[in-house]
Amino acid sequence: MALEIRTITDREFAAWVDVKATTFFGEVPVAESIDYRRATADLERTWAAFDGSQVVATLASFPAELTVPGGAIVSADAVTSVTTRSTHRRRGALTGMMTASLVSAAERGDPVSILIAARWPIYGRYGYGPSTDTASLSIDPRNATFAGSPMEGLSYVHAATARASAEQIFDRFRRGQVGAITRRPNTFDLDFALVKVPGYEEWKGYSVLHRGDDGEPDGYLRYHVLDKWVGLEPGSTLVIDDLVAATPRAYASLWRLCLEVDNITRVTADERSVDETLRWLVSDGRAVGGTNVSDFLWLRVLDVAAALSARRYLTEGSLVIEVDDPMGHASGRWALDGGPDGATCVRTHSSPDLSITSTALGAIYLGGSRLRSIAASDQVAERSEGALATADAMFAPAVTPWCNTMF
């Protein structure tokens, strides 16, 4: 029997959460958490595959804002909570939910859709491409002493005090960082453990604020310590849970604090930029070791004209780009004229200079993947001489894109 794909009703929400939690996270959902989860869910964007009346697969999305090259903000459909019960794999559940969700996003007018892929091979077939990378850092603070940048403007504060400023600090940061997205308000409440939800691991750690010369907060830090001693020798690890800085001075001061906490022999941080400034602030950049460098944010373009017009380009150029999108959203030929000061993109019937798949277009959109590298595959074809070099130069990143928000 074919699976039914549709959004869920309020009565079906508990069953949806059960499938999501036990399938993807390998945990049994706590009944007391259902009310909290329901309060933050938009049922018009909460999809399921049904076998009769039984929920067997899940998908949800929420509205986000994405910073693109040049500093513009575009609306993005953020896809999350994608699961399929092992009993119902290979029956079209994921394709059905993705198709329905993307049609809805296109109808809402979202230029792009984003997600974080559990596995690389899954989402290319739906037009998504890897658009940012991330790194986990592991640092021996004894070898990473600061050469300058005095530690100043810092204060340890109660979690509620930090939470009161964190949302504004993060908003300032993400508007200046290509690839960053908005965080939902309930995320900050959970991060600082100001709400206690059964089934969620409660954060227990330290909160720090940085203030600029004007006294306004412009950076915050959350961390916890894994305390360990070998005899009388310290062996503790400081785990950075979140370090967000809206200014270079806040960035340097917060990092210096982390590297100078007593009795710490290792500092770790996940979901950091692959081009972390920290290595240039310490005496030995090799001490800032990047581990597990991987893809992070995946992006697919839904509205080519809106998406390519919104961003800026490193060099001036004009191209006719033919996009091959099996799902149809981005298909067509598009005349792009762009540069550092602005861009226009419209449909055209002119001969293409470059042919590209929707997956490759998503990968290069933020500048996280280079077109010249993708061109080694069959996802890009040069149709006029020099077009590949022009496009690669235009889409090259002025700054490394980075998303530091898991969703």
Image (spheres, grey):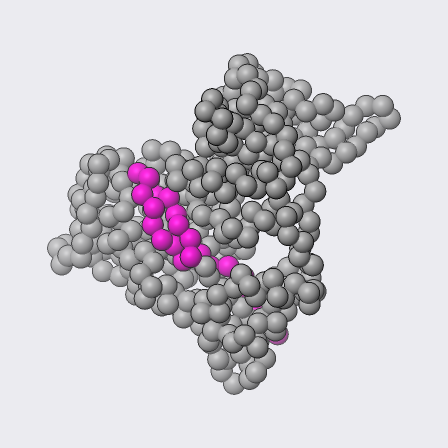
Q: Is residue 75 magenta?
A: yes
Camera-nearest residue between 216 and 260: 216
> Residue visible at 46% across and 55% down?
115
> Residue visible at 54% across and 74% down?
10
* Quadrant of the rendered image containing residue 144: top right
Which range is magenta? 63-87
Extreme-top residue of the structure: 147
Judge whether residue 374 can be spotted in this image: no
Percent x, y of residue 146: 57, 17
Percent x, y of residue 174: 43, 40
Extreme-right residue of the structure: 231
Question: In this picture, is 74 found above or below 367?
Answer: below
Q: Is residue 184 magenta?
A: no
* Quadrant of the rendered image containing residue 366: top left
Question: In this picture, is 85 found above or below 263?
Answer: below
Percent x, y of residue 322: 23, 55
Judge whether residue 259 can be spotted in this image: yes
Camera-nearest residue between 128 and 42: 42
